[in-house]
Image (cartoon, coloured by chain):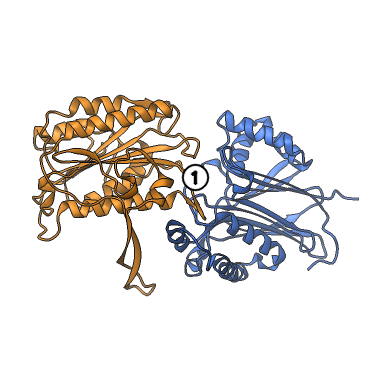
Amino acid sequence: MSYSAEISRSNPTCFVFVIDQSGSMADPFGGETQGSKADFVADVVNRTLHDLVIRCTKTEEIRNYYHVAVIGYGGAVHPALLGELAGRELVPIGELADKPARIETRNKKVPDGAGGLVEQQVRFPVWLEAAASGGTLMCEALGLTLRLVEQWVGEHRNGFPPTILHLTDGQSSDGDPSAIAQQITALKTGDGNALLYTCHVSSTRGGKVEYPSGETALADDFAKALYRMSSALPESFVRAAAQMGMPAGEGARGFVFNGDAASVVQFFDIGTRPANLR
Amino acid sequence: MPSQPPPWRVQRYLSQKQGSAPGECEDAIACNPRTWACAVADGATEAFGSRHWARLLVRAWVRHSAAAGKDAFLELVTQLAGRAERHWAGRPLPWYAQEKRLQGSYAAFAGLVFRDTGEGLCWQAIALGDCCLFHFRGGALIAAVPLSEPEQFGFRPKLLPSRADAIPRCAGAIGNFEGTAAPGDEFLLLSDAAACWLLAAGRSRDAAADTFRRLLAQGRVAEITALVEAQRRNGSMRNDDVAALSIILDPPP
């Protein structure tokens, strides 16, 4: 059965975050007036990396269950981790944990146990800064992703397949990325093909489509092309989506179109939940 | 507390999942002949300090086996939560361990105690999660609690938390069980991977299930390890820590 490989130190899996940092990411989400998409997405990616680190923490040590890469693309394509990890591509999660660029203190509202909320200070490690400039070199970014994933599956023949979480707010400015996406999802380990999920976010409100099982709800060729690039969700991811109240049914693809801020949070949460951690 | 030694033969087996070191095993077992009590616990893989929490639970419970009732059990767990908190307090931990510590530890648990009623033996058990008790009489399984079908495993069961504020929320999931015990009866306490496997193997009349019980009862550790590894290899048993206790009541004189 595919997508059932145990994830362990001797058999890790891989997450690649591919983040659109083009100029339009400086705009707010549709219907919002404050905060750029870039700021919000950077926060969500940092929070997701934090959660992956915490998941691998075993008491006083951290176990390398995951390898992680963050690729940013706008007018240029680059590994986007900061600080000591600047320029690094795939990084073991233990190294990621030990080398955030900085750890901020932020306020978070948490339940007070009496039905209300109380503000609490929490650590917020930062590995990725918000950025928004230039075009949308999606083909080049997916080309780098292809190279990393190809190398990784060559070294981890029995691993849970790599998961690529691609977030964009616009059309590619360097050609049609469909063929490269197909090459990525054709890569496989003994446990299944690489998974490419796509979250398209929008500066205009409305028309949101999340985890569709077909193209009928998609309005145009651009949306359909992104849908076709995206992998079907294996069963464990469908279950994760269902637990979050997302109506992802059989055959649902890891694809969001015209997503809003909430879609982004759910997208990274669902996409990083393969269930077989040991 | 009974003044007599228990009328039983006990054997235990504990091994870590393949790929882990023995010191990383998060299952725990304990047995106390003074209280006639035994317990297994399975520290949650993704939680903080699971090994320490599981060991704390079983060791304390077999010392205080009167805690077979739900209220006494919750009181004991609350006390242990305080001890666990003090254990980690003040230690220099990296930022991620400090964060994880806030979430607390979690463990599945099953405890079994025997009591002499004057007219014979009875057993009481308390369990939460997917650690299981099996009761065999004349070689036949007559009780499996809290889970009795292999399909019931793997659905993120409620576990015992080490955070005092979370303990009351697990109260509803704690199961109390009891029955009579006869000389020659066999009891097994197993953590989830072995329990699930034993139920499935028993259902399919796989001879490996009987072999496992026989080897366990005889304390043949190396052969049990070989059997467990073979069952993992053929995909019948999940690669997880294994905790197993076999308790066989003395046969009639």
Circle 1 marks a residue in which chain? B
What's the residue at 22%, 50% (across, down)? A263
- Left of B49 or right of it: where is A152? left
Q: Position of residue B241 (x, y in %)?
A: 60, 44
Any part of residue B173 in sight: yes
Element on which disc 1 rests: loop
- Figure check: B12 above or below A116: above
Residue pushed farthest front?
A84
Q: Position of residue A78 (x, y in %)?
A: 23, 39
Q: Which chain is blue?
A: B
- Left of B159 or right of it: where is A212? left
Q: Colour of chain A?
A: orange
Q: Nearer the viewer, residue B86 or A116?
A: B86
Q: Where is residue A162 in the image (x, y as percent from the top left)?
A: 35, 34
Tag 1 residue: B154
- Left of A258 or right of it: where is A84? right
What's the residue at 27%, 52% (across, down)? A44
Few, some or many residues within 10 Å of mark 1 (<14, 14–19, 20+): few
What's the residue at 38%, 32% (across, down)? A161
Q: Which amino acid does label 1 sit on?
A: Gly
Q: Nearer the viewer, residue B215 or B49?
A: B49
